[in-house]
Image: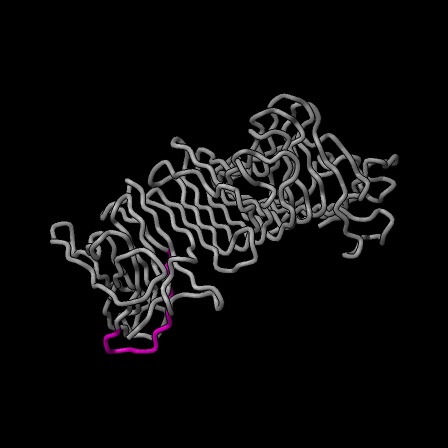
C-alpha cells in the first residue's frame, strides 16, 4: 500500500511523491494505483477533471482520499485534516464513481451548465462508497439533475457529516441500492428540491440518523414514490425537520415504499412517530390520550391511525411493535392494549386486533404468535372487549387482549393491526401483562 499527494498547484514531475511533485487531478492520481492506497489531497486543491473517478479499491482494501493541510506534517497526521479541497466537472459532464473508496473532506461539484448533469456515487455492483466531512453538489442547473446514490441495484453509499446541494427544485436524490446518511447538521444547501428523495428502477433502502433536513419546509416533500419503480424502505431516526414539510407522498401500492420517522421532528420532543403505508398513516397524538397510558415521562401520548380505502383484513395497517419484557415461563400471561374510536360500537376482531410474538419453545429462538383477531377468512367476526379506561376524547373505548404461554424469558412484541378501511382509531402504545 502506497501513499500519494494530490495538489492542483504542483509544478513538479506529477508522480505524487511529494507536494511539489503531486498529481494535479484526483482522477489522474487514481489511475493505475493499487487497492489500499492512500491519497493526500491538498486543502487548496481544485480540479475540474472528475468525470470518472475510478479507483482500484476493494471491499477489504478500500482506496482512501483525505483532504489535509498542505502546510502541515509530512506525511500528514490526523490534526492536519481539512474539508476544503474541491473536485468538479464543467459544462454538462457527470461525475461517476466506481471502486471501493473512502473520501474525507472533499467538496464534489457536478457540472456548471444548463444541461442535464448527474452525480453517480457508485456504479459497480457489490461495491461501496463512503464520504466523511464532504459536500456533494449539483452545479449544473438542469431541472431534472440528480444525485444518484447508486446507478446499480446492489451497491452501498454512506454519508457522515456530509451535505448535499442543489440548484433547481426539480433536482433530487435518486435512490437505488442502500443509502445511509448520518450525523449531518444543515444537511441541505442551495435550492431545496420539491421532492427530496425519488426512486430508481430497482428501489433501495434509506436510513437517515441525526440528519438536519429542516431546510426543506412548506411545499417540500421528503420521501417520494411513483407507480413504475422499485420498492424502497425509508427510516428516519433522530432527524431535525421543518414543521411544515410533508414527510412522504402517498404510496402508490403494496410493494412500493414504506416510510417510518422515529423521534424526528421540528420541536424538542422525544416521542414523535410517523408511519406511512398504502393502508394508512400513523402519527403521534397528545390530546386524545389514555389516562395512565403511554408517556415519554412528561407528555401522555397515543397513536392516531387513519386508514385508507386500501386497508382490509387481508392486508391491514400494521402499527410498530410495542415491546415488554416477560419473566414468566410455563404459565399463561395476557397482554392488553387499549384503544378508542368514534365507531359507535366496539370494533370487530376483523377490524382491529392484537398480535403477540413470544418464545413458545424452550429450545429454540423461533418466535410464536397469538392474536385476538378473527380466526380465518371463513370465521364469523366478533366484537372486541369494551373498556372502562379514561381517554381525553373520541367516544367508544375498547381493549385488545391476547393470552399466551412463553417457555423462555424475553421480549414480547405486541403489534396492533387494523383491517377496517377509511377509519380513524387511537391506540395507546403501552402493553400490560397480567
Quadrant where the image shows the C terminus: bottom left
Residue placed most toward the observer, 430 or 425: 425
The picture quadrant where one finds residue 15 is top right
Does residue 329 show up magenta in the picture?
yes
Task: Classify residue 61 as left or right of residue 47.
Answer: left
Q: What stretch is highlighted in magenta?
A: 320-333
x, y (%) of residue 122?
57, 38
Residue placed most toward the observer, 133 or 339: 339
Residue pictured at 34% horizontal, 38% vertical: 253
Task: Classify residue 287 as left or right of residue 53.
Answer: left
Residue lying farthest top?
Answer: 115
Q: Is residue 51 above or below residue 399?
A: above
x, y (%) of residue 140?
65, 27
The coloring applied to the image is one colour
Q: In this view, does 314 lie above or below 48?
A: below
Does residue 260 show up magenta in the picture?
no
The picture quadrant where one finds residue 191 is top right
Residue placed most toward the observer, 408 or 267: 267
Q: Is residue 328 above or below residue 131?
A: below
Task: Classify residue 22 as left or right of residue 347.
Answer: right
Number of numbered discs overlaid on the protein picture: 0
Residue pictured at 40% horizontal, 65% vertical: 294
x, y (%) of residue 395?
28, 57
Residue placed most toward the observer, 287 or 1: 287
x, y (%) of residue 106?
71, 43
The picture quadrant where one finds residue 227 is top left
Residue pictured at 44% horizontal, 66% vertical: 295
Amino acid at each position: 500500500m502506497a501513499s500519494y499527494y494530490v495538489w492542483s498547484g504542483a509544478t513538479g514531475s506529477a508522480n505524487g511523491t511529494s507536494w511539489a511533485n503531486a498529481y494535479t487531478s484526483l482522477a489522474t492520481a487514481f489511475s493505475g494505483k493499487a487497492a489500499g492506497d492512500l491519497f493526500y489531497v491538498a486543502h487548496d486543491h481544485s480540479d475540474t477533471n472528475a468525470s470518472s473517478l475510478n479507483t482500484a479499491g476493494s471491499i477489504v482494501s478500500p482506496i482512501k482520499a483525505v483532504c489535509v493541510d498542505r502546510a502541515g506534517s509530512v506525511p500528514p497526521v490526523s490534526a492536519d485534516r481539512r474539508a476544503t479541497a474541491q473536485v468538479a466537472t464543467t459544462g454538462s459532464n457527470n461525475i461517476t464513481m466506481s471502486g471501493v473508496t473512502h473520501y474525507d473532506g472533499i467538496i464534489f461539484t457536478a457540472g456548471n451548465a444548463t444541461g442535464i448533469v448527474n452525480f453517480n456515487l457508485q456504479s459497480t455492483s457489490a461495491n461501496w462508497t463512503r464520504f466523511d466531512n464532504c459536500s456533494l453538489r449539483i452545479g449544473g442547473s438542469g431541472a431534472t439533475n440528480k444525485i444518484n446514490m447508486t446507478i446499480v441495484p446492489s451497491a452501498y453509499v454512506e454519508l457522515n457529516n456530509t451535505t448535499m446541494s442543489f440548484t433547481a427544485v426539480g433536482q433530487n436524490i435518486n435512490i437505488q441500492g442502500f443509502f445511509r446518511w448520518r450525523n449531518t447538521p444543515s444537511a441541505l444547501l442551495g435550492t431545496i428540491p420539491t421532492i427530496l428523495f425519488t426512486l430508481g428502477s430497482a428501489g433501495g433502502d434509506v436510513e437517515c440518523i441525526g440528519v438536519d433536513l429542516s431546510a426543506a419546509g412548506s411545499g417540500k416533500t421528503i420521501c417520494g414514490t411513483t407507480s413504475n419503480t422499485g420498492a424502497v424502505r425509508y427510516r428516519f431516526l433522530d432527524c431535525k425537520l421543518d414543521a411544515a414539510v410533508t414527510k412522504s407522498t402517498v404510496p402508490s401500492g403494496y410493494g412500493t415504499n414504506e416510510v417510518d420517522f422515529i423521534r424526528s421532528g421540528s420541536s424538542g420532543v422525544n416521542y414523535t412517530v410517523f408511519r406511512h403505508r398504502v393502508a394508512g398513516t400513523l402519527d403521534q397524538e397528545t390530546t386524545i390520550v389514555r389516562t395512565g397510558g403511554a408517556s415519554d415521562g412528561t407528555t401522555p401520548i397515543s397513536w392516531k391511525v387513519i386508514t385508507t380505502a386500501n386497508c382490509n383484513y387481508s392486508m391491514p395497517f400494521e402499527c410498530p411493535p410495542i415491546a415488554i419484557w416477560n419473566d414468566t415461563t410455563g404459565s399463561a400471561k395476557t397482554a392488553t392494549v387499549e384503544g378508542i374510536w368514534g365507531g359507535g360500537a366496539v370494533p370487530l376482531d376483523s377490524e382491529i386486533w392484537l398480535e403477540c410474538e413470544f418464545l413458545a419453545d424452550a429450545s429454540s429462538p423461533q418466535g410464536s404468535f397469538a392474536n385476538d383477531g378473527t380466526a380465518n377468512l371463513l370465521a364469523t367476526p366478533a366484537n372486541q372487549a369494551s373498556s372502562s379506561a379514561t381517554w381525553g376524547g373520541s367516544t367508544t373505548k375498547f381493549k385488545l387482549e391476547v393470552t399466551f404461554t412463553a417457555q423462555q424469558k424475553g421480549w414480547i412484541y405486541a403489534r396492533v393491526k387494523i383491517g377496517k378501511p377509511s377509519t380513524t382509531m387511537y391506540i395507546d402504545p403501552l402493553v400490560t401483562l397480567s
